[in-house]
Image (cartoon, helix red, strand yellow):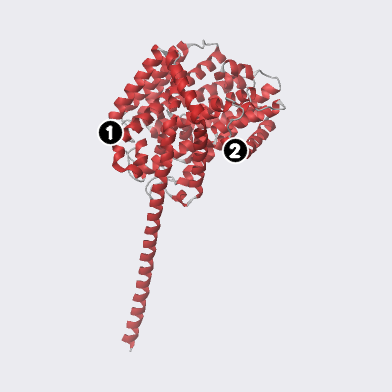
Amino acid sequence: MAKEKYTYNTQKPGLVFLVSTVFVALFVVWGFIRPGQLAAAATEALEFTIHTFGWLYMLVAAFFVGFIFFLAVSPYGRLRLGKPEDRPEYSFYAWLGMLFSAGIGVGFVFWGVAEPILYFDDTPLGQDVESQAEAAQLGLEYGIFHWGLHPWAIFSLVALALGYVQFRKDQPALISSAFYPLFGDKVRGRLGQSIDILAVLATSTGVATTFGLSAMQISGGLSYLTGLPNEPVTQLTIIAIISVLFMFSAASGLDKGIKYLSVINLTVAGILLLFVIAVGPTIYLLENITTSLGGYISNFPEMSLSMTPFTDSSWIGANTIFYWAWHISWAPFMGMFIARISRGRTIREFIAGVLLIPSLLAVIWFAVFGGAALNLELTGQAGIVNIVNDTVELALFATLQEYPLAGLTNGLAVMLIVIFFITSADSASYTLGAMTSKGSLNPTLFAKLVWGLLIAGTAAVLLLSGGLEGLQTASIVAALPFSIIMSMMVVSMLKMFIEDTKQAKTVAKMQERAEMKEEILKELEQEMDGFNRKNQKK
């Protein structure tokens, strides 16, 4: 398929940039000077939010999944993210790689082993299980559940709304633009700026914590493999090196930096996955994929809406609701970036690529890596549970260590995380640059570098002070108002889709009438010509 080339205007950073950077800087200062106070305040706010509004998170997350599936099978699925003549800018493989490069790929690598092991040790919803095998299956299903359809539906909703208003309606690349169909020019005032600032704060703080977690995982992996001290100095050095590499990627632009690195990373991840299937307990892992997929599909409705009002278990709040809030807090960033790289695709094609394929890959990745770790634990070959409970970032490395060519595969795993780290930084700085540059899809290098350095600096400072967890918790609290914003996006999208579908039908009818009129005129002309020829013969 021929790929389209589009050009985008550059604009200087605006008011949202100034306000957002000041707020982020204040949060960093608070986290550095009084990390305990920030963590305590954020934790209290999060506990209140989850306890009081946990039911709301469960309902809206399930509703978003249902709504995205509805769009896929509805007539609106034929609409395109762009003008009717627009076509995709990136090949399908590059596009798929870039979807994971935006940050969610780090989650797969970090939690693909750790989460099934943690849930095997601490059974979901406090359920009583009759055997370790049942606990293992339950752990896998919930690990897949937290990284499958729900997060990708959340990201898809925001990306669809933004992609449609940007490329179909010619609105700037701002979260507030999604509400233009509802509020008109009012979104260019204080209301829109408030929405954009909230989105920027949630994105920047969420990405900064992921920076810190990635640095910890790379540091832990290097320590496990080489004996290098796993301490703040190592983590800060990693952040500094990644920051320099990210600057080169950011300077080269989306069409070179992120695109090429994403293709490399998707390939490396595929090689690592196939290697574990080949050298591990192959039949066990293949059966695990099948069983996990079946269990996920059959238990999906119950897991989506299960809470514990009668047992007062805290598991659902500490895990499922926490994850839904975390994914919603990431939705502005992921949605903005996915929208940018999805121009020209139909809504139906978009949903297949952004919802179904990543969810299927989540099933395969967790079933293989989580299943391999559970197999090592259940057969007594390695104490993965103790390692994960002690140092969660070592989960993947400890598992790969038990298989042949451990040095090579662990090196590939470190490479995978490093590239994901770079592409996450690049995509985050691009997205934040666009969101704070009046919606320009070609933000200045200055804006991208400022955000990249600010995020890296935030992660570094809070790693030193111990305030990283507090900042992560604070970013998740911002998910509550954004879940309401996303619900309003549904109304806005439906309004656009209904109007454009009616308009498309009207245009189609007018074209049909014009064609019929043209055919009738041709027939009349032919009859007149025939009549004239007859008269001439007479």
**Residue that numbered label 1 is attached to:** 11
Give percent across and percent down for residue 119: 61, 25
Residue placed most toward the observer, 233 or 118: 118
Give percent across and percent down for residue 436: 32, 30
Q: Quadrant of residue 200?
A: top left
**Residue at image point 62% right, 32% down:** 141
**Tag 1: residue type?**
Gln
Give percent across and percent down for residue 42: 44, 20
Q: Quadrant of residue 523?
A: bottom left
Q: How many marks?
A: 2
Q: Residue furthest front?
A: 310
The quarter in which the C terminus is drawn is bottom left
| 457, above or below 174, in the image | above
Query: Is any part of residue 419 visible from this angle?
Result: no
Residue placed most toward the observer, 237 or 481: 481
**Residue that numbered label 2 is attached to:** 300
Query: Disc 1, disc 2: CB below 8 Å?
Result: no
Query: Is any part of residue 325 visible from this angle?
Result: yes
Helix or strand or loop: what does disc 1 sit on? Answer: loop
Q: Residues within 10 Å of mark 1 (few under 14, many from 20)?
A: some
Task: Specify whether 53 is left or right of 15.
Answer: right
**Tag 2: residue type?**
Phe
Q: Earlier in the sequence, mark 1 or mark 2?
A: 1
Give percent across and percent down for residue 76: 45, 50
